[in-house]
Image (cartoon, rainbow, N blue to C red):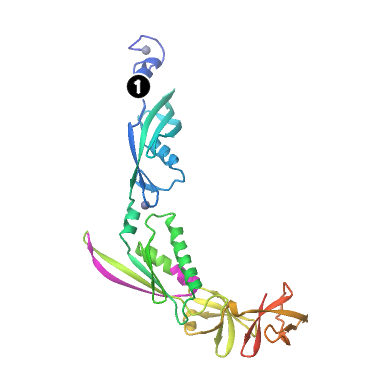
Amino acid sequence: MFCVKCGREGRTYSALCRECFLQANRFTSVPEFLDLNVCAHCNDYLMGKRWKHYDLEEDAVKDYAADNIALRQDARIAELEVGAEKMDAKHYRVRMVAHLFHEDLEVAEDMETTVRVRRNVCPKCNKIQGNYFESIVQIRPSDKRFSDEERETVLNRALSYVEGMAKDSRDAFVAKVTQAHGGYDLYVSTISLGKMLSRDLVSTYGAEFKESSSLQGQKDGHDIYRVTYLVRLPPYRVRDIVLINGRLYMVHSTGPQSAKLRDLKSNELLTVMNQDLRDVKVVGTSKDVLDAVVLTETEREYQIMHPVTFRTVEIKHPRDFERKGDTVKVFPYEGELYFIGN
Ligand SMILES: [Zn+2]
Ligand SMILES: [Zn+2]
């Protein structure tokens, strides 16, 4: 074989020798200017069709330039070097070297482009600004009202659940939060997220859960519904002390169907269905539990100093319980002390 241009003999590429072929052909190109959109609210960058988070703008600029390289079909890039230089607040000069292969030829090609960073609003922030929501999660206390601290804890749990979901989906967000009826209304982006959030709260707190929907109108021939999830938290929380039929129990754990309670007299654990605990009376919380100094200890009982009256009192030492310090926790109720633990 010989080159049709210079006549050199040897391997040819489209009838040309290596040098003539490379002179006449280029495998990569990039537009002179590229516009990279950044959301003015969440600072995510639009890469192709997806909005993505970058810690450094320069990395977004480099990726964007690299993504916009047009490569001839008969070549493949083995390695790409990208360097970006900030010209001013909105412009980057990007230089790239592509090491590529065409058949058995190894070629390096230089490219340059200017990336212009444009401030825009992503669809998600646009929706949030427009208070877009498809479902409302109503978190309500029952019986006892939330303390400010607890209300905040419940809200933070709900918001961090949504934040976790938002890592995998830009459709997951809370458009707004309002205080209502001693609890919160969360305006949630989608119906499925509202449902998942409600279920999470139900299983964490053993809450009751009701769903209702209303027709909002039509879009593209489909009915548009808005769904409201009412999540009513039970009157008790884990570590609360409740009174049932004259006996005291500590709430050991809560779940979607049932709660585990510890009998403060017998120390036994029992499982009770959530619906049987709706009207239970909370007589104490972890704040009402006191430390009592242990004076002497036998296998069956402790002698302790009553934390309020300072008198010496005896209290049952539950089997298999090992105390960790000089004190044990007790709960005073109607003239009696109940053993709680460490
Ligand atoms: Zn040639
Ligand atoms: Zn945004």
What's drawn in magenta, residue-wise?
199-219
- Outermost residue, top direction? 7
Q: Is residue 218 magenta?
A: yes
Toward which corner of the image does residue 223 lie, by quadrant?
bottom left
Between 216 and 15, the one nearer to me in the picture: 216
Q: Is residue 198 left or right of residue 302?
A: left
Instruction: Please provide percent x and percent y for residue 250.
Output: 59, 80
Residue 188 vs 66, above or below: the answer is below
Residue at 46 percent of width and 82 percent of height = 143
Report whether residue 1 is seen.
Answer: no
Picture residue at 57% right of the left edge, 90% below the top: 246
Instruction: Say which residue label 1 marks.
Output: 25
Q: In this rendering, would 308 be left or right of 45?
A: right
- Residue 326 inside the magenta-drawn segment: no
Q: Which image quarter is the N terminus in? A: top left
Q: Residue furthest front?
A: 88
Query: Which of these two is toward me, 338 or 268?
Result: 338
